[in-house]
Image: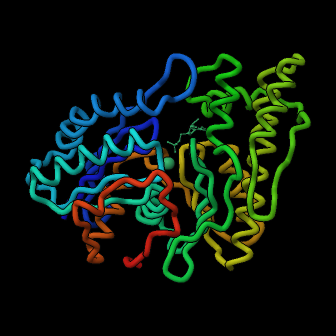
Amino acid sequence: MLCLGIEGTAHTVGVGIVDESCRVLANEIDMVRPQAGGIHPREAANHHADAVVPLLRKALDAAHVDPSAVDVVAFSQGPGLGPCLRTVATAARALALALDRPLIGVNHCVAHIEIGRGTTPCEDPVLLYVSGGNTQVIAFARGRYRVFGETLDIGIGNLLDKFARECGLPFPGGPVLETLAAAGSALLPLPYSVKGMDVAFSGILTAALALRRAGRTLEDLAFSIQEIAFAMLTEVTERAMAHIGKDEVLLGGGVARNRRLQGMVARMAQDRGARLFVPPGDLCIDNGAMIAWTGLLMHRAGVTMRLEETAVDQRFRTDEVEVTWR
Ligand code: AMP
Ligand code: MG
C-alpha cells in the first residue's frame, strides 16, 4: 500500500510517498525564503500553489511510481497558517478526486511523532517537538497524544529566526546561529523562563537584541541563546518524562537538527537511564513523508473522511485527535 502525503502548514510545501513499512520512497520539499521580513501567509500560500504540482511530479518520479499506484492521499489539516492550509488541502482534494482515492486530513504535530516512531526504534517516547511555529512536549496517554508542556508565546525556531533576521542574517536563522554559537564562549544573561511544564521565549529575544545593540558579538549571543533556550527545553522534557514515567525521548521539528540541543537532551536522557532518538534531518523538518505515513496509519486503522470533514483547522490541537491506530 502506498500513501502520498502533502504538507503545507507554514513555510514549507512538501510531497512524500511512503509504503506500509514506513519506507520513504520520495520526500520532496520546497521552502519559501522571504528576501526581507517574516513569512507572509498569503505569499507563502501563493508559493505553495505554484510549487505543489511540480513537487507532485518530482515525488512520483523519485518513487518511480505511476499516480494510479497511490492508494491513499493525505494532507496536513492543521495547525498552521490559514491560506497555506487551504491551498494544500485544495490540491489534496483535487488529487484524491482525480485518482478516486480516500483522502485523510492529518494533524501536523501528530505526524512529527509518528514519523519518529516509524523511522527510529522508539516505541512510546516523550516527543520534544521544536519547530518554527510550534514548541511542545507531547506523549501518548489514554488514547491520545497529549501536550504536557508548550511555549506560552513564540516557537523556539521563531526565536532563532527572528533574532537572526533582526541581526541581518539570512532565513532560516537556526542553522546560521548554530555555526556562530560554536565560536562563542561568554554566557550572557538572558531570561530563563520556565513556568511549570511550559516555556516562554519572547523575553530572550528582547534581551538578546538589547545586548546586541550594546555591542555584544553575534557568536556570544548565539551561544547564549542556545544554552539558555535549550536548557529550558531540556528541563521541561525531563519533567514530563518523570511525570508520566517514560524512558524514551524523541526529537522532532526543524530545531531537532541542532547538535547542541541533541547533546543536551542526550545527556539528560543518559543521566536518567533513558534513550534519545533523532529521526534523519529531512524527516525532522516539515515534510510530506510524515503526513503520508500518518495518513497510512490512520487509513489502516479504518479512519475515513467525507469531503466535508476535510476542512482545515488553523488551531487543530494535538490532543483533539483520537489515536485509534495504536
Ligand atoms: P520546521 O518548522 O519544523 O520545518 O523547522 C524549521 C525551523 O528549524 C526554523 O526555525 C529553522 O531555523 C530551524 N532549524 C533548522 N535547522 C536548525 C539547526 N541546525 N539549529 C537550530 N534550528 C534549526
Ligand atoms: Mg513542523
- Residue in front for this viewpoint, 281 or 16: 16
Q: Is residue 235 left or right of residue 77?
A: right
Instruction: Specify whether 3 is left or right of 291.
Output: left
Colour convention of the picture? rainbow
The number of numbered discs placed on residues in the rendered structure image is 0
Apparent side of residue 250 relative to residue 213 in the rendered image (left or right): left
Residue at point 57% right, 41% down? 132
- Residue 246 in the image: state x and y as whole percent: 64, 76
The reply, left or right, for residue 63 in relation to residue 281 is: left
> Picture coordinates of residue 191 (x, y %)?
87, 43
Question: Could you tell me which quadrant the N terminus lies in?
Answer: bottom left
Residue 254 in view (yes/no): yes
> Residue at horizontal 24%, vertical 58%?
3
Residue pushed farthest front? 308
Q: Residue furthest bottom?
A: 142
Percent x, y of residue 323: 43, 75
Image height of 31 relative to 100, above or below: above
| Quarter location, residue 86 | top left
- Dividing the picture into quadrants, the one containing residue 226 is top right
- Residue 38: x, y in percent? 56, 27
Tell me which residue sits at (66%, 43%) in the image: 154
Quarter holding residue 237: bottom right
